[in-house]
Amino acid sequence: MACAVYLPPAGDADCQTMALAPLSAFTCCSVERAGRWYGLRSRRQRDVSMSSAHNSCSVDDGEEGVDSTDGATATAGDTTSGLLKIQSDFDLMSLDPKDKKEQDHYAVLGLAHLRYRASDDDVKKAYRNMVLKHHPDKRKDTGGYGRERLDAVFTCIKHANDVLSNPSSRRSYDSVDPNFDDAIPSNSANSKANFISVFGPVFERNSRWSRDQPMPLLGDDDTSYEDVDDFYGAWYEFDSWREFSYLDKEDVDKAESREERRWLERQNKQQRTQKKKEESTRLRTLVDNAYACDPRIRRFKEEAKRKKEDQKAAKAAAAKAAADERLRVQREKEEAERKQQEAEAEEARLQAEAARKTREANKKAMQRERKAFRTACKSHNYFTDDDAKRVSHMENVELLCEALSITQLERLRTEVSAANYADAKGAFDRQVSQLQSQQEREVRQAAEAAAAKRRAEAAASGKSASQNSWGNDDAALLVKAVKMHPAGTVNRWEVISQFVNQHSTSGATRTSKECISMAKNIQKDATMKKDVNKKAFERFDKQHGQAASRESVPTERTEGPSGMSPWTADEQKLLEKAMKAFPSSDPERWEKISAKVGTRSVVEVKKRVKELVDKVKAKKSAAAASK
């Protein structure tokens, strides 16, 4: 291959061209005149005017700002007014419209050095310049790229302008600016040692997200307590405008139906809410770490503590002086009283300790005895194979544990444990019968005492009542009692007679036989029954007409063990709620029910439940018999 060397012509006719040294031998090599690097070099030559403007801008390793060295003031002929700075390492030709959402829009328009500080005019000018340079119809030098590649690049440039020129979409993009540093300092020794230098830039960087501008900054070591308090108060109430709609994973525009669109919107809303919570947590952690590392806070707390201690010491000194003066006068008297009180207190303590030990010993012994008795009864399967009777026997076991003394319980437990099944069951049944007889006897005695009291009151007021004649009021009470206690009720006629005697105002005491006889007469004589019902209705209408606002008094029953007061309506409601709240599978059911009622013991609660169960069974039996 032959090569020719052309020397430059002489600048003057008097000058001569001469060779100073021989040329080396020529070497043949292949040169690629079209390719990636050739196109890049061509673009750089084409944009030489813009690269000169870039040389006057320095970017400090990810920090957002402009350091102008020369040419800081733009000339009139500069189309970008000194604002458009092209990054030499950003290759527009590498952009892909498929990834336009992930591209750096500021870098695409040449505003990477300004980013969120760029004004709307800056965005317009930058876009106008990029259109003049990269529009496929206006671009003369394609740089070796095809029309499809140029159209793709311009599509990315147009998308960047669409995002940044719209305030709403630009706000969304600025909220997720990839160049923003979300890192926050930790609560470490280095953060405490260099507090201002570590946390100051972080607070200044994050203040851009606040709706309230300007936000107070960290200050320095000499900042007053009021300013520091205002700083943390403002940052703890930080109201961020940052939102994360730009990161939505679901594109609602691709929805094929209204339901799908709503579903996508809900998914996006959940993701935004989650990121908003994470952002709030990040800012709160920043403020918490700063507050924990702030040496000024520690200094303020120490000063406040020292001031408080000084005031407390002064107050204590004054109080001590006054107390010393009083103690000087009363010392001898108090010494004598102290010795006497110590002796009395020691004696009382010994007595109380002895009494406490005795009570504890008795209590523990009673608990052991009750547990042993329950275990013995349980070992005999509560003396029955019927589930319904077993529940009744379990209630009887609890009644015996509550009613018997430790001596009686120990004797009964010995009989139940040592004997065979038949003897143990006999001993258990005898003790239950004795307890029930005692309870019934106490009930009768209480009813008789109440009747005697009423008779005495009637005699004292000059009233006399016939023991054999039934008035309309007593007959109405009898009819009411018969309806309240249907056939099947345990000790039905005794309960009916007690009800009549309790509510009667005549002063007469009615026995169960008298109640049975009178009930038969009313049942046989239709006229008497009708008259009794009519009189009862007239009395009811008269009472409610004269005292309409008077509250009704709940009916009281005298059934139950000795000393048991009648159940009120409020107690009955509490019992019903507790029965529903605590199931039978709960081992501590009765204790919880008793605690819920509040005014009744476990024995009283079980007794009341048993009465209610008997009532229900009796009503069901009566209904079945009537059918």
Image (cartoon, rainbow, N blue to C red):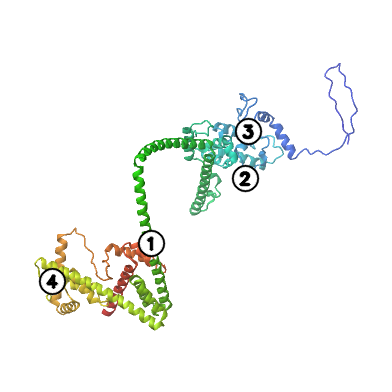
Which quadrant of the structure image shows residue 50? top right
Mark 4 neighbour density, 10 Å: few (under 14) some (14–19) many (20 or more): some
Question: Which label is found at residue 354?
Answer: 1
Which circle's residue, 2 or 3, is located before the other in the chain? Answer: 2
Which quadrant of the structure image shows residue 345? bottom left
Which circle's residue, 2 or 1, is located before the other in the chain? Answer: 2
In front: label 4 or label 2: 4
The C terminus lies in which quarter of the figure?
bottom left
Mark 1 to mark 4: distance in Å? Answer: 63 Å
User: Which residue does the image show at 16% across and 59% down from the upper left?
Assistant: 547
Q: Is 538 situated left or right of 11 in this image?
A: left
Q: Secondary structure at mark 3?
A: helix
| Residue at numbered disc 4 | 472
| Residue at numbered disc 2 | 99
The amino acid type of the residue labelled 4 equals Asn
Which circle's residue, 4 or 2, is located before the other in the chain? Answer: 2
Q: Secondary structure at mark 4?
A: helix
Is mark 2 in CB contact (under 8 Å) with mark 3? no
Q: Is 439 situated left or right of 184 in this image?
A: left
Is mark 4 in CB contact (under 8 Å) with mark 2? no
Is mark 1 in CB contact (under 8 Å) with mark 4? no
| Residue at numbered disc 3 | 132
Mark 2 to mark 1: distance in Å? Answer: 89 Å
Mark 2 neighbour density, 10 Å: few (under 14) some (14–19) many (20 or more): few
